Amino acid sequence: MADVRDLRIVVIGAGMGGLGTALAFARKGFKDIRVFETASNLGFVGAGIQIPPNVVRVLSHLGCWESIAKEATIVRGTSIRGKPPAKNLV
Ligand SMILES: Cc1cc2nc3c(=O)[nH]c(=O)nc-3n(C[C@H](O)[C@H](O)[C@H](O)COP(=O)(O)OP(=O)(O)OC[C@H]3O[C@@H](n4cnc5c(N)ncnc54)[C@H](O)[C@@H]3O)c2cc1C
């Protein structure tokens, strides 16, 4: 009987969802995984990425968290600044 892990897996998009999906298939033993990305290049944009606890659990499960944690900064607090709401809003 054919092994399901011999199936070809095609993932469209190399964002977090696509790469996470590809990695999850790889961890399950799938060998033929192709990721297609329409962007001509993927580069640094100089932005910080906040990683909430539920994502840490997923990254740990995928075996990625330890190397990310070495580069990460633990944020002790945040604030969101903006205009106060208009008075007659409600
Ligand atoms: C300014 C900003 C800041 C953010 N900050 C955070 C943060 O700090 N922490 C956090 O957890 N989330 C953050 N997010 C949200 C996070 O970026 C998204 O939730 C996440 O990137 C979604 O991942 P995705 O893989 O679903 O989609 P995407 O990242 O959009 O990836 C989809 C990919 O598919 C490709 N694609 C689309 N169509 C095709 C096609 N036909 N063929 C091939 N490739 C295709 C696209 O080019 C893209 O690379 C932020 C979002 C923004 C906009």
Image (cartoon, grey):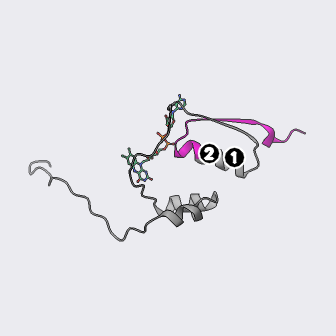
Quickly name the residue at label 2: 21
Q: Which residues are magenta?
A: 1-19
Q: Secondary structure at mark 1?
A: helix
Q: What kind of element bears circle 2?
A: helix
Choose between 66 and 1: the one closer to the eye.
66
**Which percent across, then down, holds residue 21?**
62, 45
Task: Give the left or right position of residue 80, taking residue 76 as reference.
Answer: left
Residue 62 disc label: none
What's the residue type where badge 2 is placed? Thr
Please, which residue is most extreme toward the right here?
Answer: 1
Q: Are marks 1 and 2 in contact (CB under 8 Å)?
A: yes
**On the rendered structure, is 29 left or right of 12?**
right
Does the magenta segment cover residue 74?
no
Q: Decide: is 38 above or below 83.
A: above
Q: Is residue 74 left or right of residue 16?
A: left
Instruction: Say which residue label 1 marks.
Output: 25
Residue at the image point whose x is 71% and y is 48% from the top: 26
Q: Nearer the viewer, residue 19 or 3?
A: 19
Residue count near mark 1 (Cα–Cα under 10 Å), binned few <14, some 14–19, many ≥20 = some
Q: CA distance from mark 1 to mark 2?
A: 6 Å
Is ligand 1 less than 8 Å from the beta carbon at label 1? Answer: no
Question: Label 1 is placed on what type of residue?
Answer: Phe
Residue at screen point 64% across, 44% down: 22
